Amino acid sequence: MKPLDAKPNLRNQQRVDVSSAITLEKPGGCQFQCEIANLSRTGAMIECDAQTAKALIPNMVPPAPKNPVQLTARFQVPVIPAQPVTVVAESNVVYIRRIARDQFHIGLQFRSFEGNGFVYIDQYIGKLFDESRQN
């Protein structure tokens, strides 16, 4: 029997589990509230219900690499505990997976950031990794 290959890390970055609100905006301006399930320096996995997934991804068809679904992601990271900063990232949807009857995971790949968005994510993820090593 041939052994199964390990699932590749689609983002080639370490991921941290995060439970945080995120706003996803389509190019036409429609906004949707979702939840971040995990975060890396290059993308995020988002949890949403079926209605939101259908609104974000036309026909619920996984996006083709050369024809991505583009979204603007807005979320906060607590770089300084008393003062969270807002990250705005232009993103591509790279996958959609049904997890339960009314729960979907949507994979986002960040394309570009406004201002210091990448620096804020990098600092936040670094801080979470440092905390996990101390425990």
Image (tube, grey):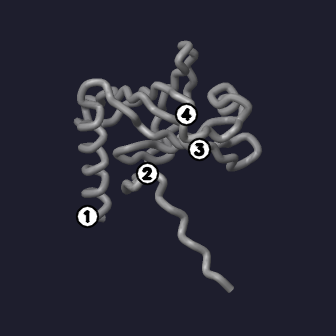
Marks 2 and 1: which is nearer the front? 2
Q: Mark 1 points at which residue?
A: 134
Q: The residue under label 1 is which amino acid type?
A: Gln
Tell me if mark 1 has few (under 14), some (14-19) or many (20+) residues whose alpha carbon lies within 10 angstroms of its own: few
Marks 1 and 4: which is nearer the front? 4
Q: Earlier along the polypeptide chain: callout 1 or callout 4?
A: 4
From mark 4 to mark 3, how far is it between C-alphas?
10 Å
Marks 4 and 3: which is nearer the front? 4
- The reply to whether discs 2 and 4 touch (Cβ–Cβ < 8 Å) is no
Q: Mark 3 points at which residue?
A: 95
Q: Earlier along the polypeptide chain: callout 2 or callout 1?
A: 2
Q: State the image coordinates of residue 76 (x, y, percent, origin top left).
A: 37, 31
Q: Earlier along the polypeptide chain: callout 2 or callout 4?
A: 2
Disc assigned to residue 11? 2
Callout 3: SS = strand
Q: Residue at x 47, y 58 (%)?
A: 9
